[in-house]
Amino acid sequence: MKLNHLIKLGSFGISTVLFQRKKPILGTIIVTDKCNLNCKHCSVNNHNAVIHPYEQIKQEMEFLYKKGIRILFFCGGETLLWRSENKTLRDLVIEAKDMGFYIVNIVTNGTQKIDLPEADLILLSLDGDREHHNIIRGNTYDVIMKNIDEATSDNICLYMAINQINKSCIQQVCDVAKDKMNIRAVSFNFHTPYPETLDLALSVYEKQQCCDKITELIHREYPIFNLKSAFDYIVHNNFPTPCYQCVVMENGKLSICGRCIDVPGLCEKCGYFFAAEYTLIFSGKIKVMVDMLKTYLRYI
Ligand SMILES: C[S@@+](CC[C@H](N)C(=O)[O-])C[C@H]1O[C@@H](n2cnc3c(N)ncnc32)[C@H](O)[C@@H]1O
Ligand code: SF4
Ligand code: SF4
């Protein structure tokens, strides 16, 4: 990350805390809800299976930039299925960087070829060892490993949603991250129990055990892109919600925090680590701020 961007993000953070502002800094654009998979834990794929056109995405990028967003994510559906007017997701990433976004990340299921050197991070979902990942995501583990090995850049961060099926696989996912050259780190979330996937939710005790395991791995120098200072809040779901510094844009609709905000009662059971980390930082938790600074400087 460039030093001047870091300084600007820092001053945004300080003014947000001091004046209790609700201005957003992190935005996600959903480029499509179309997906080639149908994962057991997912509630957002293929509702309309629409690929949003380039002009619309461009306008959404400009809108978010004008609103002050400087950290941008592209997400889906399967994000890498996006194509419009001969453009690919890589063109969107390059355009976003040219527009002035400081950090541009994408989220993918890893089943398509990976050629996105301009992205700051490619968050690539891996939900366990081969057996458990494939139970959740169909028979995709081997093709994902091949795509990681053949990726044209080393900016991949594994992304694991921990649930009842794969809660014993934290170490295995971290081992993959440590072993593969193109992988920089692993980032975890807990399952967020939408009404149709309640059975995959973890209890407080299970979340604590997972966080203890992740903490142990951080101490053993595994590359983990989460803030351990936020774990206690995440385990007990006692961080403030929603996160006003994050917004999502899907097909022209802007939501605060996540598109999940419309699901009644979900925020009290939120498993998304970013929501906890950002609300804690912007509510002035010094330990979490220092943790974030160290972690971001290490991996971005
Ligand atoms: C919705 S997917 C979209 C991008 C891409 N298709 C993928 O799978 O990475 C983004 C991330 O959300 C995660 N996810 C989906 N449903 C979830 C849930 N109920 N709780 C927590 N994470 C979830 C997925 O595992 C994935 O890492
Ligand atoms: S690949 Fe991503 S969007 Fe598709 S079903 Fe799985 S989690 Fe959902
Ligand atoms: S806190 Fe944010 S990310 Fe978590 S469930 Fe609510 S809207 Fe979604």
Image (spheres, rainbow, N blue to C red):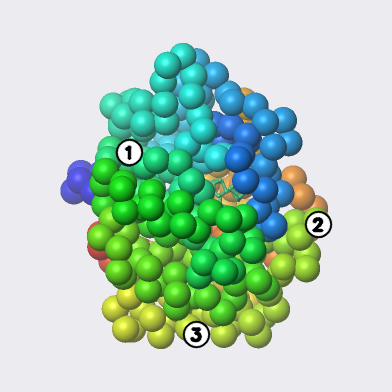
Front disc: 2 or 1:
1
> Which residue corresponds to mark 2?
195
Image coords of residue 271 (percent x, y): 62, 64
**For mark 3, what is the residue?**
212
Q: Amino acid at mark 1?
A: Asp
Q: Is residue 131 visible?
A: yes
The residue mark sitting in front, 1 or 3, is 1
Find numbered disc 1 in the image and state the secondary structure of the residue it sits on. loop
Q: Amino acid at mark 2?
A: Pro
CA gap, disc 3 and disc 2? 28 Å
Task: Report the front residue among 270 and 132.
Answer: 132
Marks 1 and 3, how far apart in space? 35 Å
Instruction: Note whether residue 296 is visible.
Output: no
For disc 1, the marked residue is 115
Say left or right for 6 vs 57: left
Give left or right: position of 23 versus 207. Answer: left
Question: Which residue is drawn at the image coordinates 35% and 66% (left, top)?
Answer: 177
Residue type indicated by callout 3? Asp
In the picture, the quarter occupied by the C terminus is: bottom left
Q: Provide the secondary structure element on which disc 2 rests.
A: helix
